[in-house]
């Protein structure tokens, strides 16, 4: 079993829909990262969080440390949000990332 | 530029040859990471440098892989006697301690 599991693997939605991507992990962590990768493009860090909730524009990330679970939400989704979203975790004392397998999001106009 | 720079962006080589991949991190970033993204395998950690500490090499898949970071800045990942399974996108990232990682655009390595 992978240390970081994401769901769903693929998600297709209509423009404007509210999107939720989930991440569960099985190890103790010091931080969780949400990353975005556009087709053929580089990886961009969206959020780094260790507790609570963060918001940036239409994106919201939450984490529940006790339940070892995080969610990434996108409000008022847009075709430009189409990308692969990757959850990754850092363990205490080491900043290297362990990655989930990613969620491929497609937003249809 | 202000971002993480990797070169070359693409590399095609024959099986058995050695390759060197270069990463220029963001100036002042103390941490530097190498990751690999293979088709069907997702992203995996290779090696991590933090300041003057000994690097964490726990992700290197075999002794054909090595990396160094000179002067706390530029890093080179070397793969000796390349194999077809080494074909992947090799990504470098850098960060300040406790801050998000900034990724380069990667080197796409193809072994013929």
Image: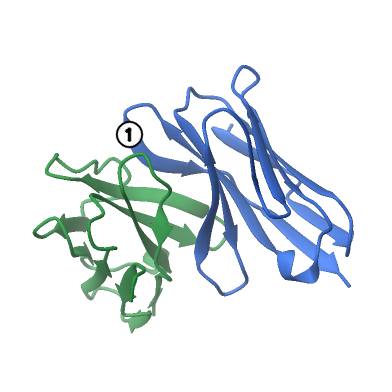
Chain colours: A blue, B green
| Quadrant of the image occupied by residue A66 | top right
Q: Residue at x 33, y 45 (%)?
A: B59
| Quadrant of the image occupied by residue A53 | top right
Q: How many marks?
A: 1
Q: Is residue B60 visible?
A: no
**Residue receiving disc 1:** A94
Q: Is residue B82 visible?
A: yes
Q: Is residue A34 left or right of residue B107?
A: right
Q: Chain of mark 1?
A: A
Where is the C terminus of chain B found, in terms of image quarters? bottom left
Residue B12 is situated, as x and y percent measured from the top left of the image, at 36, 83
How would you rate the neighbour count of disc 1 (Cα within 10 Å): few for under 14, some for 14-19, many for 20 or more? few
Residue lying furthest left:
B71
Residue B51 is situated, as x and y percent measured from the top left of the image, at 17, 45
Residue B49 is situated, as x and y percent measured from the top left of the image, at 22, 47
* Closer-to-camera residue (A57/A75): A57
* Closer-to-camera residue (A72/A4): A72
* Closer-to-camera residue (B87/A48): A48
- Identify the secondary structure beneath mark 1: strand
């Amino acid at each position: 079993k992978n240390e970081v599991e994401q769901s769903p693997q693929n998600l297709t939605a209509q423009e404007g829909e509210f999107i939720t991507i989930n991440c569960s992990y099985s190890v103790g962590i010091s931080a969780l990262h949400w990353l975005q990768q556009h087709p053929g493009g580089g990886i961009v860090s969206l959020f780094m969080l260790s507790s609570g909730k963060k918001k940036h524009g239409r994106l919201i990330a939450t984490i529940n440390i006790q339940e070892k679970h995080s969610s990434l939400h996108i409000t008022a989704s847009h075709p430009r949000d189409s990308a692969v979203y990757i959850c990754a975790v850092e363990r205490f004392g080491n900043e290297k990332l362990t990655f989930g397998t990613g969620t491929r999001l497609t937003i249809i106009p | 530029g202000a971002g993480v720079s990797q070169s070359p962006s693409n590399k095609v080589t024959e099986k058995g040859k050695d390759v060197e991949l270069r990463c220029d991190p963001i100036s002042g970033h103390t941490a530097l990471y190498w990751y690999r993204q293979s088709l069907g395998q997702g992203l995996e950690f290779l090696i991590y440098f933090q300041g003057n500490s000994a690097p964490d090499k726990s992700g290197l898949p075999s002794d054909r892989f090595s990396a160094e970071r000179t002067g706390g800045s530029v890093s080179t990942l070397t793969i000796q006697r390349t194999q077809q399974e080494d074909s992947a996108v090799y990504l470098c990232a850098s960060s300040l301690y406790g801050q998000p990682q900034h990724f380069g655009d990667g080197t796409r390595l193809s072994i013929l």
